[in-house]
Amino acid sequence: MTFQDFDIDPRLLAAVAQASYVTPTPIQEAAIPAALDGQDLIGTAQTGTGKTAAFVLPILQKLLGGPRGHTRALILSPTRELAQQTHETIEALGARTGIRSATVYGGVRYTSQIKALKGGIDIIVACPGRLLDLIGQGCGRFDRLEALVIDEADRMLDMGFLPSVREILKHLPARRQTMLFSATFPHEVEQLASQVLTNPQRIAIGLMRPVETVSHALYPVDESQKMDLLLALLKSPERTSVLVFTRTRRRADRITRQIARAGLRVTCLHGDLSQSHRQAALNGFKSGAYRVLVATDIAARGLDVEGISHVINYDMPDTADAYLHRIGRTGRAERTGDAITLATPQDWEMVWTLQKIMGEDLSRQMLDGFEYSRQVSAIYAPVKAATPAARPTKSHGRHFAPARQSVRGFYRRGG
Ligand code: AMP
């Protein structure tokens, strides 16, 4: 299938070609015809699957006909970074159409956002908090709205935005096309979907499965050696563009300083930093000025950087959903990536959950030439042929699996 097979305007096809999209991704193949048909959609798709273009192209097509000077599409995003990236996708794909888009999110000045809302910019990409704030000030004009997208609904829920989303919905016309995207469907998201969508078509791509081009590896390590192991991993020349995840902002800062002291070009992205700092960090990482970006989950949500070679989970994510989103940053658009997770003995509970979800064991690796403390080598005995955890996904070095006694509880739970 090609993009020409969709019933879309030649100006959009030209922009698609300009963006070097040749073949539609599976979510695009399924969602674009349904959305062009005007249907409501529930898309189960993680980032990295091409879901943004899957809703942006039909919206642009819809807006080509009809009046200008009114906001006719609203896209709700959980984070500023995702909102910014969606806006950039609209600008790129809509470059030849004259359709304009603007972002509305917190942490920046109100002036241009008020102007965009009052001026009836065609597409508004907004984070719920700031949008609701501005609607409260009488700025939103949505009486001509035709399309609404609720993107990453599960993250909206995690971040406590669902009440704001519901409040915003009260200001939108009931007759509209609505598309909701989420990687997972907790009860509250299902409930929202059943309330805001009419006879939706469900499109499930890669439901709770990681991007298939990513290989996963666990590097068992003692807490005290995590930093040394991270530095040793970063030194490998094949790790050209690495995203490192930490649990907290403070840890992100500390790790960034330590990596910088080791002489690597590194920057950092988290919620405590100003918008301009975040933008500079992102731009620097995108351009290759920084080889390593250290980020927290929320800051990196929806991050769209071409060619991230590796994602390293310095800290184990708190949920399987967060794991899937983190590793969705690599292997994007069918590139091959690698996801490395440093796992301490305290993390085995989560390892079990991840393996359950992925339906396969994560391979255990040890870095050749790294001086492991005795503790670690005692905990993780080399793999024996019959060990359940000995099915590696890709070779990184020597394969190791936890010794049975340290994971007895782990396997008893059904892993
Ligand atoms: P998304 O899942 O929307 O975050 O998109 C992930 C990445 O894939 C972005 O960098 C897009 O520019 C890129 N992309 C989207 N659709 C295609 C396509 N059909 N072919 C190649 N790349 C694509």
Image (cartoon, helix red, strand yellow):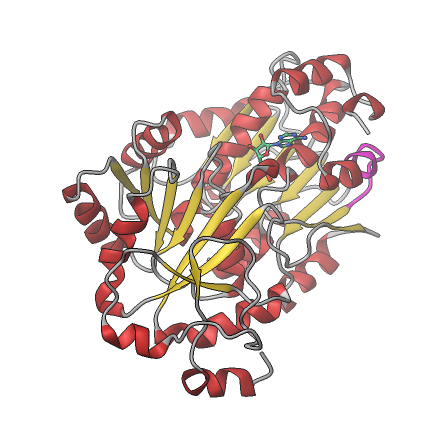
- Name the residue nearer the viewer: 9 or 403: 403
Q: Position of residue 151 (x, y in %)?
A: 60, 46
The answer, for residue 217, to whether it is visible in the render is yes
The answer, for residue 161, to whether it is visible in the render is no
In this view, the residue farthest toward the left is 261
Residue lying at 37% horizontally and 25% vertically, measured from the top left: 287
Q: Position of residue 215 (x, y in %)?
A: 54, 51
* The C terminus, quarter of image: bottom right
Residue lying at 26% horizontally and 77% vertically, measured from the top left: 375
Relative vertical location of residue 89 with respect to residue 257 in this rendering, above or below: above
Residue lying at 22% horizontally and 56% vertically, measured from the top left: 228
**Magenta region, residue range:** 32-40
> In the displayed structure, does residue 399 sit left or right of residue 94?
left
- Name the residue nearer the viewer: 401 or 317: 401
- Name the residue nearer the viewer: 275 or 234: 234
Q: Position of residue 306 (x, y in %)?
A: 49, 32
Q: Position of residue 246 (x, y in %)?
A: 33, 56
> In the displayed structure, does residue 193 sit left or right of residue 112?
right
Relative vertical location of residue 297 with respect to residue 188 in this rendering, above or below: above
In this view, the residue farthest toward the front is 385
Residue lying at 31% horizontally and 45% vertically, measured from the top left: 234
Quadrant of ligand 1: it is top right
Query: Is residue 112 highlighted in magenta?
Result: no
